[in-house]
Image (spheres, coloured by chain):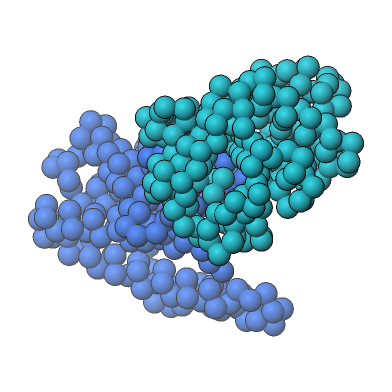
Chain colours: A cyan, B blue
């Protein structure tokens, strides 16, 4: 359960943002590369210095410890990073049912990270994030390396997930069709401002 | 047994060897002749100066003068640590991390050794203090420099891995744990190797010096053991302090990885 509210939130390259994503809602964000989308998501996860306020439900960011905030406001970076050799070492609480939904075998926990394909990495990174049960999802092009079948799986999973768990989703994507498929509202960055696309 | 004094000619002969090496390096285009000659020149000038300063201090052993020399040595060591960093902390932290760590470790260990173990009279007696501090600083300096360089270099290289851990809700200490461990290990390995090889493969410098000066070999080996253990402790504490302070400064109060606190890579 979670909503995300921004009040005069300033991240690098962007004008101050006022925005609310209610629980269970998905907002897509597009814009040219280098326009500050990824840095906005990083600032929302409190990985970069920023100004203004961000609220999770009725609590302001700084009333959380930084790790607690990041567990609630979960960021999926465009490129996933792995620090241990084995996949399983990155999962304190593995969830086999989630793995199955993304067509990942339960054996994946035993695999070596260096042998993963880029698509497997991307799907596993999503599972790894969801295992934390965050209240808000910040997704930075989560389907960029996937084939159509897996794109459908990821979109389906996120769509069910946000409704069942009442999670707010902020989804960065370049694909106009995907924006229409997954977004309740569509936003765009142009000239350092956030605009409603539709 | 008395000390055989070295003449200028003796020193010149050893310098010829280095010159030959430099010429060889030039002919084979190894590219180290410049550094080699500069370092050799520094050794000659610095050690002559130290000899003169100590000669003066032996006569004129005012505590304040000794303290000044000790501080001077500390700051030069701090500068050397800084100079060996590929990526330095910006601002006062650049000099600060290394100098503070060496101050904590070398000075404490030296003080301990002088007052409790050796019990020189007075404890700040130049004959014991300066050589002891010098050996501790020299070795701690290497350990601190290696550890810090390792830490900052790897933090830069593994930024994505560290941030991935932060993103998933790990604390900064969890996210940097492995890096800390390996930085510390690499700073400690030289002294561990030196201790393992001491007396079997290598005859350590100080023991050699004492024997040359006519000290009984067994006394010399006891002093060397003392020094080795002190150096190991000093290097370990120094590297620990440096890695702890340095890794903490890599993160801000919101546990963000702040690589902007490091300068861009040199060389």
Q: Position of residue B160 (x, y in %)?
A: 62, 45
Q: Nearer the viewer, residue A126 or B113?
A: A126
Q: Position of residue B223 (x, y in %)?
A: 37, 39
Q: Residue at point 46% right, 57% down?
A: A15
Q: Residue at point 53% right, 66% down?
A: B266
Q: Is residue A107 left or right of residue B251?
A: right
Q: Nearer the viewer, residue A72 or A114?
A: A72
Q: Could you tell me if residue B141 is visible in this image?
A: yes
In this view, the residue farthest toward the front is A198
| B121 vs B69: above or below | above
Q: Could you tell me if residue B164 is visible in this image?
A: no
Q: Is residue A106 left or right of residue B241?
A: right
Q: Is residue B199 left or right of residue B5?
A: right
| A39 vs A160: above or below | below
Q: Residue at point 57% right, 41% down?
A: B163
Q: Residue at point 17% right, 53% down?
A: B67
| B51 vs B12: above or below | above
Figure disc tally: 0
Q: Nearer the viewer, residue A122 or B188?
A: A122
Q: Is residue B47 left or right of residue B260?
A: left
Q: Nearer the viewer, residue A72 or A157?
A: A157
Q: Position of residue A185 (x, y in %)?
A: 64, 42
Question: Which quadrant would the C terminus of chain B be assigned to in this image?
Answer: bottom right
Question: Image quadrant of residue B66?
Answer: bottom left
Q: Position of residue A59 (x, y in %)?
A: 40, 28
């Amino acid at each position: 359960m979670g909503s995300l509210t921004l009040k005069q939130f300033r991240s690098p390259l962007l004008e101050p943002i006022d925005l609310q994503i209610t629980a269970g809602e998905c907002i897509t964000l597009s814009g040219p590369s280098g326009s500050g989308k990824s840095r906005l998501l990083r600032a929302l996860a409190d990985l970069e210095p920023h100004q203004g306020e961000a609220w999770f439900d009725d609590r302001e960011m700084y009333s959380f410890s930084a790790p607690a905030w990041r567990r609630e406001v979960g960021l999926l970076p465009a490129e996933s990073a792995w620090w241990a050799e084995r996949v399983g070492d990155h999962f304190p609480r593995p969830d086999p049912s989630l793995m199955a939904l993304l067509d990942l075998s339960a054996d994946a926990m035993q695999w070596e990270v260096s042998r993963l394909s880029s698509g497997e990495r991307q799907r596993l990174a999503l599972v790894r994030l969801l295992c934390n049960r965050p209240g808000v999802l910040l997704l930075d092009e989560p389907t960029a390396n996937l084939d159509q079948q897996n794109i459908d799986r990821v979109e389906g999973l996120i769509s069910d997930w946000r409704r069942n768990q009442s999670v707010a989703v902020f989804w960065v994507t370049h694909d106009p069709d995907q924006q229409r498929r997954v977004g309740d509202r569509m936003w765009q960055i142009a000239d350092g401002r956030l605009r409603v696309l539709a | 047994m008395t000390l055989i004094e070295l003449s200028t000619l003796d020193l010149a002969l050893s310098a010829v060897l280095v010159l030959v090496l430099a010429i060889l390096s030039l002919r084979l285009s190894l590219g180290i002749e410049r550094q080699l000659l500069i370092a050799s020149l520094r050794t000659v000038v610095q050690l002559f100066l130290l000899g003169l300063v100590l000669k003066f201090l032996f006569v004129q052993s005012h505590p304040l003068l000794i303290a000044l020399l000790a501080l001077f040595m500390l700051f030069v060591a701090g500068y050397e640590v800084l100079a060996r960093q590929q990526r330095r902390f910006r601002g006062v932290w650049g000099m600060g991390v290394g100098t503070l760590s060496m101050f904590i470790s070398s000075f404490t260990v030296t003080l301990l050794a002088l007052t409790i173990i050796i019990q020189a009279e007075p404890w700040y007696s130049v004959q014991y203090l300066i050589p002891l501090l010098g050996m501790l600083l020299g070795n701690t300096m290497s350990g601190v420099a290696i550890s810090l360089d390792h830490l900052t270099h790897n933090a830069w290289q593994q930024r994505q891995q560290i941030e991935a851990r932060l993103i998933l809700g790990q604390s900064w200490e969890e996210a940097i744990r492995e890096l800390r461990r390996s930085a510390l290990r690499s700073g400690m390995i030289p002294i561990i190797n030196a201790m393992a090889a001491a007396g079997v493969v290598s005859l350590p410098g100080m023991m050699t010096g004492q024997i040359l000066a006519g000290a009984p070999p067994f006394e010399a080996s006891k002093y060397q053991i003392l020094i080795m253990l002190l150096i190991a402790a000093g290097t370990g504490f120094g590297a620990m302090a440096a890695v702890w302070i340095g890794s903490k400064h890599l993160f801000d109060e919101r546990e963000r990885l702040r690589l902007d606190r490091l300068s861009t890579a040199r060389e």
